[in-house]
Image (cartoon, rainbow, N blue to C red):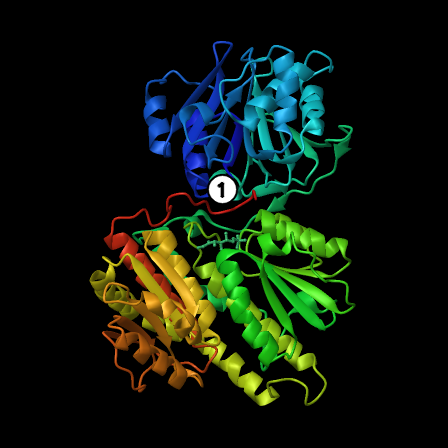
Amino acid sequence: MCGIIGYAGHRPAVPLVVEGLRRLEYRGYDSAGTAFVQGGEMRVVRAAGKLAALEEKLASCASATATSAIGHTRWATHGVPAERNAHPHCSNDRRIAIVHNGIIENYQELKADLLAKGYTFSSETDTEVLVNLISEGMKTQGSLLEAFAWALRQAHGAYAVCLKSVDEPDTLYAARMAAPLILGVGTGENYVASDIPAFLPYTRDVVFLEDGEVVMLTASAWKVLALEDLSPLEKPVRRIQWDMQAAQKGGFRHFMLKEIFEQPRVITDCLAGRVDGDTVVLRELESLPVPRRLHIVACGTSYHAGLWGRHLLEHWARVPVSVEIASEFRYRDALLLDAGDAVLVISQSGETADTLAALRIAREHGVPVIGLCNVVGSSIAREADAVIYTQAGPEISVASTKAMCSQMVMLALMSLAWARLRPAGEAGISPEDSAGIIDALRALPGMLDAALPDMHARAREISRAYADARNFFYLGRGHCFPLALEGALKLKELSYIHAEGYASGEMKHGPIALVDPSFPTFALALDDALFPKVKSNIVEVQARQGRIIALTNPGLDIAADDVWVVPALPAPLSAFMALPALQLFSYEVADYLGKDVDQPRNLAKSVTVE
Ligand code: F6R
């Protein structure tokens, strides 16, 4: 899981590539590098650590006047995070350099063949194998392009790869198979990158490349070819509307904070064009019948959104729902054969390898797949039978925040849309109550916008008293249980404090044994039918000297070390107030502890490998 960029144009390429890499750093950041041709030689500069380390090294290469270069920001998949494993990698004769995102699964076999032919390797990477395989192809294939395609046809696995050579210094070749790659079409310059923000300041005109496609680009031309036989392909150029500001911090200390505060806007955007008076309009679903059973498959935060959505889908639309982690689903012999089943894959990035694999399994079973995705043109969005875009805008911070909010809005809308299609009397929500929920959703952005500053201040205040904890419980019931899981995930990934989310009713089945004065609990005690049950679970924890933060609504009678009151909304919409509180608490703890909030260690934004 890495970010790659290639540039062919008229500007100094190296600074431009480094700048593009900075906007791709969310894809991984344990090392970075660039390659360009200078004085008829391949120059490769690489550094372990963040981009600043690469920039430092480049400062001593002031003579780099190349107008074409490739670059890479890496998240280790093969080999430890170290300079020798950083990209670009060169062929033994140093005439070719490549950057690569993905995994070549059969690289050991390919490497054994190359070793037998006398090739040597200085890294542990599959990428160095691939570049030497291309070099080997040069001996038998007619051209560099043919050698590139010949080598890729032998590589099994996932890749987005970009190649630069000494012999054709003004041309770049790139290809994709199961990893994102986008061509940016400029004036007198062209780009290829893992994601649009890499080149967005320079062009909004893009070509989405598909699996099995090769692109050849120079400053003035580009063409897309089929990997199989190098036949030319017609590809439409699309204009992207995102502006760069959306991908910048906008005055906030971190992207994460900015993205938490964007949630009111996200809700508004999710509702735009999707609610008309009392009715939900989800045109994307019109071609599919209401499923008899729905299987939701996702990872991480998106999985938690799915767990939350199940409550609404079952309660309102009366659709039986299972929710499963994609990495489990894909290797289980899931029973998807019933006519009437549908699979809903939820993914912010639309590139998560396990979720994409689950989608493909469902399609192999002939089961319709609905994708709930944020990234337009992503693999999941393209392969699903129907796609609902979540409209969260680019999410830069590695920890997902606004994307979950947008997924929850869409799940609520889906539930209402399907409830309406139920025969009279079979829906779990009346048309009047449905209209009330739509009204509450419309009012939500304003309420949340007004509540966020106080919520942030309270999060900061409380976080200071708990930042020394080494362990945390998060408890909730009903629709708040998925929020407890999400709260715990946010705390552990941002602050590296061990945190467990539990259904509060489970505590006395074992976990309560852990409670002592140093093991605090964050309890979701919102105003809903299960409040009295949650309250007694809190009392049980207090009886073991456990400290409690209780997130609650006005007027509820609850005693806790820290009572945190957020505005009330009818359940389950109260989740839209609880979610930012949980996010802000984790944000504040992590920031107070001096952690790298936007780029937590060992994580990457888009998990495109297993
Ligand atoms: C946590 C987080 C991850 C992602 C997960 C799935 O903050 O961001 O748990 O939710 O990797 O990613 P997507 O939604 O892109 O499939």
The quadrant in which residue 128 appears is top right
Residue 557 rendering spot, x and y as whole percentages: 29, 86
The quadrant in which residue 472 appears is bottom left
Mark 1 surroundings within 10 Å by alpha-carbon count, few (fewer than 14), some (14 through 19), many (20 or more) = many
Q: Looking at the image, is 412 positioned above or below residue 530? A: above
Q: Locate residue 497 relative to residue 268 in the image: left or right.
A: left
Quarter occupied by the C terminus: top right
Residue 31 rendering spot, x and y as whole percentages: 41, 31
Q: Nearer the viewer, residue 116 or 506?
A: 506
Residue 48 rendering spot, x and y as whole percentages: 38, 29
Give the amino acid type for the residue marked by disc 1 in the picture: Leu
Residue located beneath label 1 in the image: 200
Q: Looking at the image, is 409 positioned above or below residue 84? A: below
Residue drawn at the location 65% of the way across and 11% of the way down: 117
Q: Locate residue 567 relative to residue 367 in the image: left or right.
A: left
Indicate the secondary structure of the residue bearing disc 1: loop
